[in-house]
Image: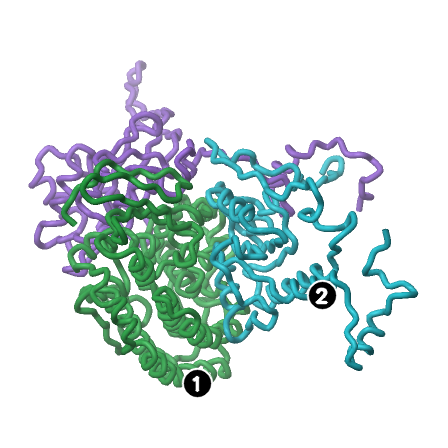
Amino acid sequence: MRDPATPTAETPTSAERDELRRQGILLTSIEEIYNWGRSRSVWPLQFGLACCAIEMIAASMARFDIARFGSEVFRPSPRQADLLIVSGTVTKKMAPQVVRLWNQMPEPKFCFAMGACAISGGPFKQGYNVLKGIDRYIPVDIYIPGCPPRPEALLHALMQLQEKIRGQRLTGPSAPPHLQAGAACDCPVPAFGGHDLEPPKNPALWQPPVLVRKEGA
Amino acid sequence: MSFSLPSPLESAPGARVRAVRDPFHGDLLEVSMGPHHPSTHGVFRMNVTLDGETVVKLKPVFGYLHRNHEKIGENASYLGSMPYTDRLDYLCSMTNNWAYALAVERLSGQTVPERAEYLRVILAELTRLLNHTCFAGFILQDCGASGTPLMYAFREREKILDLFESLSGSRMMCNFQRFGGCRADATPEWLEAARALVDGYGAFLDEFEELLTGNEILMARTQGVGRLPAKLAVGAGITGPMLRASGVGYDLRKVDGYGVYPRLDFRVPVGADGDTYDRYMVRVLEMRESIKILRQALGTLPGGPVMDPKARLRGFRAKPGEVYSRIEGPKGEIGFFLISDGGPNPYRYRVRPPSFINLTVLEDLCLGHSIADTVVILGSIDIVLGEVDR
Amino acid sequence: METPDQIRDRLLARFPGASVAVVANPGPAAQHSLLLGSGEARAMAEFLRDSPGLRLDFCSNVTGVDWLDREVTDVASKTIPDPAGGPPKLVEQRTKRLQPGYLEVVYHLYSVELRHGPVVLRLRTGNRSDRVAVPSLTPVWRSCEFQEREVFDLFGVVFDGHPDLRRILMWDEFKDHPMRKDYVEPDDYEWEPTPHADVLAKARRHYPAAAPAAKEEPAP
């Protein structure tokens, strides 16, 4: 099956389409206009964890104005949200709730790991109650480094996400999992154990990086 | 409320809503608010038992942001803990830095140059302005004024953050104070910008107060709500604006007289009723006093170094001993308790978190009020979860 | 304000036979503390709160400290008579003994009414394993309520008479007391890019040196 978004001799290139648009003719495909609409209305979950949440609020305020990107509608309910911004340190006590929130969000959904803590535990990596990266339990689309990242970094991540959404296929083998029959979308929720979370990671999503250590190092 | 509960209503973690039969008063409803809730200021959780809409029991649940600050502090060098203090109360990194720096200075008997003392006062009062402005925005958000007051508050916050950024290099996590002084000196241009901000802040407060203080909805939602008697407040260890709203004029800037506060002229506003409205008003009045302090400190800032030349930061060791040292943070008494065994890192590193201890009376304040009021009362305590759970 | 020695004398006058001692603080801050025996600690705390002249109505800070078992060396000098009839010899005897560890709870008290402080109280448990109970001071100062729960959670000190002693920061199923000095945290970070010695040792445990030779970097 031909990939519908790949230009061929019959389909106009984007430059030609821009030229046609200037002349009042809009050429598009269902996929393109669907992705265009989705990418301009990413509704984040109103969900703050720690310091980064303050910068997330700042991003939605007057100076940075996330509304320019169509994402000012912070939804308190995960049922209405498209984007989970994990903004801050995920503790082991909080991790099951974050995974539960992620499972409650409808597809298509995306996840940002905002800040060093959400990426890897960050400065609190040595903490006994700190989860060393939310990607051990849920799939992360975009990592935003910083401690905390500036609001501009969050906006940049949002633009990257819009790029990603615009590039998504609705059909074919590269379609996102929720459009493929039989693919699992829910992540198992970890349980509180006597010393740690059980299991300590979701092995289907995360494995420790393969390191090669030099002899004698 | 003059009836007894039928049985202890212990809630399992994750329980949502459970109805319990009470033969005399219909159903008691148990609601778990949080840890993901739009109005709990982070990952705070309250297990509330309701009779109709009235709160009959409220148990706070902590620990969802417990990131082991104290354990990490015991394994880090004295200097290495300074950036972690930024992340305690992440709205007020400058005062946290000061509290920690002062504790280490008292542990080791260090002194601080005059200019650094003034700079510390300036930065602490700017932090107080920032915190109280955001508080006013957030509590109005909790009352249902979605957006507008918070937008005003964050507009002013950005101006103060610009000052912090140009001085320390970071907007929120300033990591600026050191034991023995401050990390960098303020340039004349910076001081000029700070003066301009302070001069303009009064006009912003006038505008803000015209919008809010006489607002009928704010008064209806907050006056007489969540009254805190002075005796209970002192016994429960309440500090900061919340204690002063209950009529106790206990301000560590006056009582302990740390820094150069004894040389500055300011008053301590106290409330009369101890209700939520008073807690709002005390903070607004404190901002006016902070502007007064800032004017004096910026006007009389002496010259000289900002760092004690003898101070040693890397490889710092304190003589064996211990100290508890506290300052008046924007949220209350923030203290550090350090025990040194002579090693490169403290043997015991403890933070006295004001907003954690201020939550002791949350249940007392909320009993008998409606569930919607718990949100406003919680907002008036002004918690930051980074400090509550550490 | 009265010195810790004066407060101790007042306490002993009011509670004869009680165990009160002043623990000196050698540091420049010189905040000396009062070590109270567990038996009458609560009554003494009430006395400190209510007695005029002290009125310590504000308990600011409650915290735990974990003191591990440690070896101490006692030095005793002894004179031994010389069997040959000469002058007696002075001999230093060094004995090593194991001082058992204990958990300590520290209270920092201030007076809002009289604006003085701090007065530091200490309570000690018998050991670190089975005799870990001290009386709770929550009935005296309400502000101890959450902080004593925190000490119970993180240090494992059991407070007798606390109205609601549950874990506060960690989850209820958690079994350890993580602020103790000998707590071993779950080994759950597999890789850490910092050059700290203990972190590298941990990385070595995770990645045994059986590395394929082809991927090995050239030695500098």
Q: Residues within 10 Å of mark 1 (few under 14, many from 20)?
A: few
Taking the view exactly as shown, the residue that stands out farthest to the right is A9
Mark 2, residue position: A33
Q: Does A187 sit above or below residue B197? A: above
- How is this picture coloured? by chain
Amino acid marked by disc 2: Ile
Picture colour for chain A: cyan
Residue A115 seen by the camera: no
Left or right placement of residue B255 versus residue A79 in this view = left
Chain B colour in the picture: green
The chain carrying label 2 is: A
Near-viewer residue (B341 or B190): B190
Looking at the rendered image, the disc whose residue lies closer to the viewer, 1 or 2, is 2
On the image, the x and y values in percent for residue B253 come to 28, 67
Residue type for callout 1: Ala
Residue tagged 1: B196
Pointer 1 chain: B
Chain C pictured colour? purple
Percent coordinates x, y for residue B270 in the rendering: 21, 70
